[in-house]
Image (cartoon, rainbow, N blue to C red):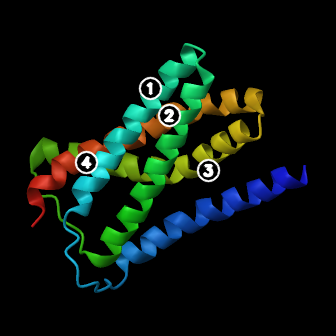
Amino acid sequence: MAKAKTYFSLIIFASLLIPLVVTILYFGPKLKVGVDLSFLPALNATLNGLTAIMLTLGFVAIRKKIIDVHQRFMTFAMILSVIFLVSYILYHSTSEPTPFGGQGFVKYLYYSLLISHIFLAIVIVPLVLITYVRALSKQFDKHRRIAKITLPLWLYVSVSGFVVYLMISPYYK
């Protein structure tokens, strides 16, 4: 029980710290690193796309009751998401935001997608961590219950992140 409380405390801490750090680095003064990081948005979109693929393959594997394959796909999705987070923070702490240049309906579509993506990206952090910890700690009943919520939200965040990149990529310098 003490271990569960420790995990829960760490999950809450990470879930609050990550959006705070992202917000500060996004809106704060930009760091000068002396390296061209303009490739990172494309890398981030690729990581999002690969995460969506891993999540889908992990879902298919568990539906077929191939548990070891499911575990590998979900672990790879976690690794990709951590790499994405580091890359995202690095890019947005060193680069000015790119304004979206679309007009009319496309502009409203873009911002609707972006806002829902950002909101759910914040919400998904504790859900992913809790789901993963429950699997690691072999609390499979609890894992299954929360995974039914986590998977579709995580998929949405991954796919919408990819689509947001496709929509804004023509406006990168």
In the rendered image, which quarter is residue 130 located in? Answer: top right
**Proximity of marks 1 and 2: CB atoms separated by less than 8 Å:** yes
Q: Which mark is residue 164?
A: 4
Q: Nearer the viewer, mark 4 or mark 2?
A: 2
Q: Which residue is mark 1?
A: 57
Q: Which residue is mark 3?
A: 126
Look at the numbered disc 2 and give the secondary structure of its residue.
helix
> Looking at the image, is mark 4 or mark 2 earlier in the sequence?
2
Disc 4 crowd, CA 10 A, few/some/many (<14, 14-19, 20+): some
- The relative height of residue 161 versus residue 65 in the rendered view (above or below) is below
Q: Which residue is mark 2?
A: 73
All told, the count of numbered labels is: 4
What amino acid type should be assigned to the residue bearing mark 2? Phe
Give the percent coordinates (x, y) of residue 87: 36, 63
Q: Image point 37% across, 82% down: which residue?
A: 28
What amino acid type should be assigned to the residue bearing mark 3? Pro
Separation (CA) of disc 2 from disc 3: 19 Å
Separation (CA) of disc 1 from disc 4: 23 Å
Separation (CA) of disc 4 from disc 3: 23 Å
Q: Is residue 10 visible?
A: yes
Q: Nearer the viewer, mark 2 or mark 3?
A: 2
